[in-house]
Image: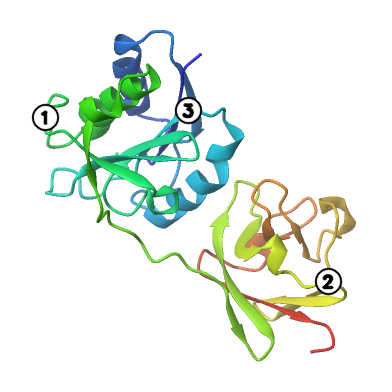
Amino acid sequence: MPIVTFITDFGIKDPYVAMVKGAILKINPAISCIDITNQLPPGDILRASFILNESYGYFPVGSVHLVVIDPTVGSERRAIFSFKNGHFFVGPDNGVLSAVISEVFEIKKEIGKKSSTFDGRDIFAEVAARLASGEKVKTLGDRITNPVKINEHDPSLENNKTIGEIIYIDNFGNLISNIKENQIPPGDIEIEIKGVKIRNLAKKYSEGSEDKPVALVNNGFKTLEVCLNRGNAASFLNSQVGEKITLRGKNE
Protein backbone atom coordinates (compact mmCIF):
# COMPACT_ATOMS: atom_id res chain seq x y z
CA MET A 1 0.00 0.00 0.00
CA PRO A 2 1.51 3.40 -0.96
CA ILE A 3 1.94 5.82 1.96
CA VAL A 4 2.04 9.61 2.11
CA THR A 5 2.69 11.23 5.50
CA PHE A 6 1.93 14.82 6.51
CA ILE A 7 3.76 17.42 8.56
CA THR A 8 2.10 20.84 8.37
CA ASP A 9 1.19 23.94 10.35
CA PHE A 10 -2.38 23.86 9.00
CA GLY A 11 -4.00 22.96 12.32
CA ILE A 12 -7.17 20.88 12.64
CA LYS A 13 -9.78 23.63 12.71
CA ASP A 14 -9.70 24.41 8.99
CA PRO A 15 -10.29 22.11 5.99
CA TYR A 16 -6.83 22.56 4.48
CA VAL A 17 -5.42 19.15 5.45
CA ALA A 18 -8.50 17.43 4.06
CA MET A 19 -8.17 19.37 0.80
CA VAL A 20 -4.57 18.20 0.36
CA LYS A 21 -5.56 14.60 1.10
CA GLY A 22 -8.44 14.88 -1.34
CA ALA A 23 -6.07 16.06 -4.07
CA ILE A 24 -3.84 13.05 -3.38
CA LEU A 25 -6.68 10.54 -3.34
CA LYS A 26 -8.08 11.86 -6.64
CA ILE A 27 -4.81 10.77 -8.23
CA ASN A 28 -4.61 7.42 -6.44
CA PRO A 29 -7.40 6.33 -4.04
CA ALA A 30 -5.21 3.46 -2.81
CA ILE A 31 -2.77 5.80 -1.07
CA SER A 32 -2.81 5.69 2.72
CA CYS A 33 -2.56 9.26 4.09
CA ILE A 34 -1.03 9.39 7.58
CA ASP A 35 -0.71 12.50 9.74
CA ILE A 36 2.53 12.91 11.67
CA THR A 37 1.44 16.31 12.92
CA ASN A 38 -0.56 19.22 11.56
CA GLN A 39 -0.31 21.45 14.62
CA LEU A 40 3.16 22.94 14.44
CA PRO A 41 3.46 26.67 15.19
CA PRO A 42 2.94 28.59 11.93
CA GLY A 43 6.16 28.86 9.95
CA ASP A 44 8.28 26.85 12.39
CA ILE A 45 10.72 25.39 9.87
CA LEU A 46 13.30 24.25 12.42
CA ARG A 47 10.81 22.25 14.46
CA ALA A 48 9.30 20.68 11.34
CA SER A 49 12.75 19.62 10.13
CA PHE A 50 13.47 18.00 13.50
CA ILE A 51 10.18 16.08 13.58
CA LEU A 52 10.61 14.91 9.99
CA ASN A 53 14.11 13.60 10.60
CA GLU A 54 13.08 11.80 13.79
CA SER A 55 9.87 10.31 12.35
CA TYR A 56 10.35 9.14 8.79
CA GLY A 57 12.43 6.08 9.65
CA TYR A 58 9.45 4.46 11.40
CA PHE A 59 7.67 4.15 8.04
CA PRO A 60 8.26 1.55 5.32
CA VAL A 61 10.85 2.18 2.64
CA GLY A 62 9.12 3.76 -0.34
CA SER A 63 6.98 6.09 1.77
CA VAL A 64 6.56 9.71 0.68
CA HIS A 65 6.71 12.44 3.33
CA LEU A 66 4.94 15.70 2.53
CA VAL A 67 6.07 18.70 4.59
CA VAL A 68 4.20 21.96 4.12
CA ILE A 69 5.64 24.65 6.38
CA ASP A 70 5.70 27.40 3.83
CA PRO A 71 5.72 31.00 5.11
CA THR A 72 7.01 32.26 1.74
CA VAL A 73 4.35 30.58 -0.42
CA GLY A 74 3.79 32.58 -3.59
CA SER A 75 7.38 33.84 -3.67
CA GLU A 76 10.17 32.73 -6.00
CA ARG A 77 11.27 29.93 -3.66
CA ARG A 78 11.47 26.59 -5.45
CA ALA A 79 9.29 23.52 -4.99
CA ILE A 80 11.46 20.44 -4.47
CA PHE A 81 11.60 16.81 -3.52
CA SER A 82 14.44 14.73 -2.13
CA PHE A 83 15.29 11.03 -2.04
CA LYS A 84 17.17 9.56 0.92
CA ASN A 85 17.40 6.11 2.51
CA GLY A 86 14.63 4.77 0.28
CA HIS A 87 12.16 7.55 1.19
CA PHE A 88 10.88 10.56 -0.73
CA PHE A 89 10.40 14.00 0.82
CA VAL A 90 8.33 16.75 -0.80
CA GLY A 91 8.09 20.40 0.21
CA PRO A 92 9.22 23.98 -0.33
CA ASP A 93 12.89 24.83 -0.77
CA ASN A 94 13.10 26.90 2.43
CA GLY A 95 15.22 24.61 4.58
CA VAL A 96 12.43 22.46 5.95
CA LEU A 97 13.90 19.40 4.20
CA SER A 98 17.46 20.16 5.39
CA ALA A 99 17.74 17.04 7.54
CA VAL A 100 16.85 14.72 4.65
CA ILE A 101 18.75 16.34 1.81
CA SER A 102 20.53 13.82 -0.42
CA GLU A 103 19.42 13.58 -4.04
CA VAL A 104 17.36 16.72 -4.62
CA PHE A 105 15.09 17.66 -7.53
CA GLU A 106 13.25 20.85 -8.42
CA ILE A 107 9.65 20.10 -9.34
CA LYS A 108 8.96 20.82 -12.98
CA LYS A 109 7.23 24.15 -13.53
CA GLU A 110 4.39 22.66 -15.54
CA ILE A 111 3.26 20.36 -12.72
CA GLY A 112 0.21 21.27 -10.73
CA LYS A 113 -2.34 24.01 -11.05
CA LYS A 114 -0.37 27.10 -10.16
CA SER A 115 -1.62 28.84 -7.05
CA SER A 116 -0.29 31.86 -5.21
CA THR A 117 -1.51 30.67 -1.81
CA PHE A 118 -1.93 26.89 -1.69
CA ASP A 119 1.01 25.05 -3.24
CA GLY A 120 0.47 22.27 -0.68
CA ARG A 121 -2.72 21.28 -2.47
CA ASP A 122 -1.94 22.39 -6.00
CA ILE A 123 1.68 21.25 -6.45
CA PHE A 124 3.10 19.24 -3.56
CA ALA A 125 0.08 16.96 -3.22
CA GLU A 126 0.25 15.98 -6.89
CA VAL A 127 3.96 15.22 -6.75
CA ALA A 128 3.62 13.25 -3.51
CA ALA A 129 0.80 11.17 -5.01
CA ARG A 130 2.66 10.49 -8.22
CA LEU A 131 5.84 9.49 -6.39
CA ALA A 132 3.86 7.22 -4.06
CA SER A 133 2.26 5.64 -7.12
CA GLY A 134 5.67 4.75 -8.54
CA GLU A 135 6.14 7.41 -11.20
CA LYS A 136 9.68 7.96 -12.42
CA VAL A 137 11.61 10.81 -10.83
CA LYS A 138 12.72 12.24 -14.17
CA THR A 139 9.13 12.98 -15.18
CA LEU A 140 8.56 15.06 -12.05
CA GLY A 141 11.76 17.00 -11.42
CA ASP A 142 15.23 18.07 -12.46
CA ARG A 143 18.24 17.49 -10.22
CA ILE A 144 19.65 20.49 -8.34
CA THR A 145 22.74 20.79 -6.16
CA ASN A 146 22.06 23.93 -4.13
CA PRO A 147 18.95 23.44 -1.97
CA VAL A 148 18.38 25.84 0.91
CA LYS A 149 19.65 24.52 4.24
CA ILE A 150 18.88 25.85 7.68
CA ASN A 151 21.47 26.10 10.42
CA GLU A 152 20.68 23.11 12.60
CA HIS A 153 21.48 23.81 16.25
CA ASP A 154 24.01 21.28 17.50
CA PRO A 155 25.22 21.08 21.12
CA SER A 156 28.56 22.71 21.92
CA LEU A 157 31.31 21.55 24.26
CA GLU A 158 32.71 24.16 26.66
CA ASN A 159 34.97 23.40 29.63
CA ASN A 160 33.97 19.72 29.58
CA LYS A 161 30.28 20.67 29.63
CA THR A 162 27.85 19.87 26.85
CA ILE A 163 25.63 22.88 26.23
CA GLY A 164 22.47 22.16 24.28
CA GLU A 165 19.06 23.69 23.96
CA ILE A 166 15.42 22.75 24.04
CA ILE A 167 14.27 22.29 20.45
CA TYR A 168 10.81 20.80 20.97
CA ILE A 169 8.10 20.77 23.64
CA ASP A 170 5.54 18.01 23.25
CA ASN A 171 1.87 18.03 24.20
CA PHE A 172 2.72 16.87 27.74
CA GLY A 173 5.11 19.75 28.35
CA ASN A 174 8.21 17.52 28.14
CA LEU A 175 11.30 19.53 27.25
CA ILE A 176 13.14 17.73 24.45
CA SER A 177 16.72 18.82 23.81
CA ASN A 178 19.13 18.46 20.93
CA ILE A 179 21.57 16.43 23.06
CA LYS A 180 21.65 12.96 21.55
CA GLU A 181 21.72 9.78 23.61
CA ASN A 182 25.25 8.97 22.38
CA GLN A 183 26.45 12.38 23.64
CA ILE A 184 25.53 11.57 27.23
CA PRO A 185 28.62 10.37 29.14
CA PRO A 186 28.48 7.18 31.19
CA GLY A 187 28.41 7.30 34.96
CA ASP A 188 27.13 10.05 37.22
CA ILE A 189 25.99 13.19 35.44
CA GLU A 190 24.34 16.48 36.27
CA ILE A 191 21.81 18.26 34.08
CA GLU A 192 21.00 21.93 34.63
CA ILE A 193 18.16 23.97 33.17
CA LYS A 194 16.74 27.29 34.43
CA GLY A 195 18.97 27.02 37.50
CA VAL A 196 17.50 23.63 38.45
CA LYS A 197 20.02 20.80 38.78
CA ILE A 198 19.03 17.20 38.08
CA ARG A 199 21.32 14.35 39.05
CA ASN A 200 21.57 11.35 36.74
CA LEU A 201 18.97 9.93 34.40
CA ALA A 202 15.65 8.32 35.27
CA LYS A 203 14.45 5.29 33.33
CA LYS A 204 10.77 6.25 33.38
CA TYR A 205 8.56 9.23 34.11
CA SER A 206 7.18 7.81 37.35
CA GLU A 207 10.58 7.94 39.03
CA GLY A 208 10.14 11.67 39.59
CA SER A 209 7.95 13.42 42.15
CA GLU A 210 5.24 15.85 41.14
CA ASP A 211 7.32 18.85 42.22
CA LYS A 212 10.78 17.86 41.01
CA PRO A 213 11.75 17.48 37.34
CA VAL A 214 13.68 14.44 36.16
CA ALA A 215 15.76 13.81 33.06
CA LEU A 216 15.67 10.78 30.82
CA VAL A 217 16.25 9.71 27.24
CA ASN A 218 13.16 10.17 25.09
CA ASN A 219 12.62 6.76 23.52
CA GLY A 220 11.04 8.24 20.41
CA PHE A 221 13.65 10.88 19.56
CA LYS A 222 16.65 9.32 21.39
CA THR A 223 17.56 12.68 22.91
CA LEU A 224 17.86 14.08 26.43
CA GLU A 225 14.51 15.19 27.85
CA VAL A 226 13.42 16.96 31.03
CA CYS A 227 9.99 16.03 32.32
CA LEU A 228 7.74 16.20 35.37
CA ASN A 229 5.83 13.22 36.75
CA ARG A 230 2.11 13.87 36.20
CA GLY A 231 2.91 17.45 35.35
CA ASN A 232 4.09 19.88 32.71
CA ALA A 233 7.81 20.55 32.87
CA ALA A 234 7.62 23.49 30.47
CA SER A 235 5.12 25.31 32.71
CA PHE A 236 6.82 24.25 35.94
CA LEU A 237 10.18 25.61 34.80
CA ASN A 238 8.71 28.46 32.75
CA SER A 239 10.80 27.16 29.88
CA GLN A 240 10.41 27.38 26.13
CA VAL A 241 12.04 26.34 22.87
CA GLY A 242 15.57 27.77 22.75
CA GLU A 243 16.18 27.36 26.48
CA LYS A 244 19.78 26.33 27.28
CA ILE A 245 20.41 22.98 28.97
CA THR A 246 23.79 21.91 30.34
CA LEU A 247 25.11 18.40 30.81
CA ARG A 248 28.31 17.49 32.64
CA GLY A 249 29.94 14.58 34.40
CA LYS A 250 29.38 14.88 38.14
CA ASN A 251 33.08 15.09 38.85
CA GLU A 252 33.79 17.71 36.21
Give the CA distance from mark 2 to mark 3.
36 Å
Q: Is residue 208 shown left or right of residue 178?
A: right
Dot 3 alpha-carbon crowd within 10 angstroms: few under 14, some 14 to 19, many 20 or more: many
Q: Residue at x 66, y 58 (%)?
A: 223
Which of pointers 2 and 1 indicates the residue nearer the eye?
A: 2
**Which amino acid lies under the numbered mark 3 shown in the image of this protein?**
Ser
Q: How many marks?
A: 3
Residue 186: which numbered mark, if any? Answer: 2
In the image: residue 192, left or right of residue 138: right
Q: Which residue is mark 3?
A: 63
Dot 1 corresponds to which residue? 114
Q: Earlier in the sequence, mark 2 or mark 1?
A: 1
Relative placement, left or right, of 207 versus 233 is right
Assess whether mark 3 and mark 1 are in contact (beta carbons under 8 angstroms).
no
The answer to which quarter of the image holds residue 181 is bottom right
> Residue 201: which quarter of the image?
bottom right
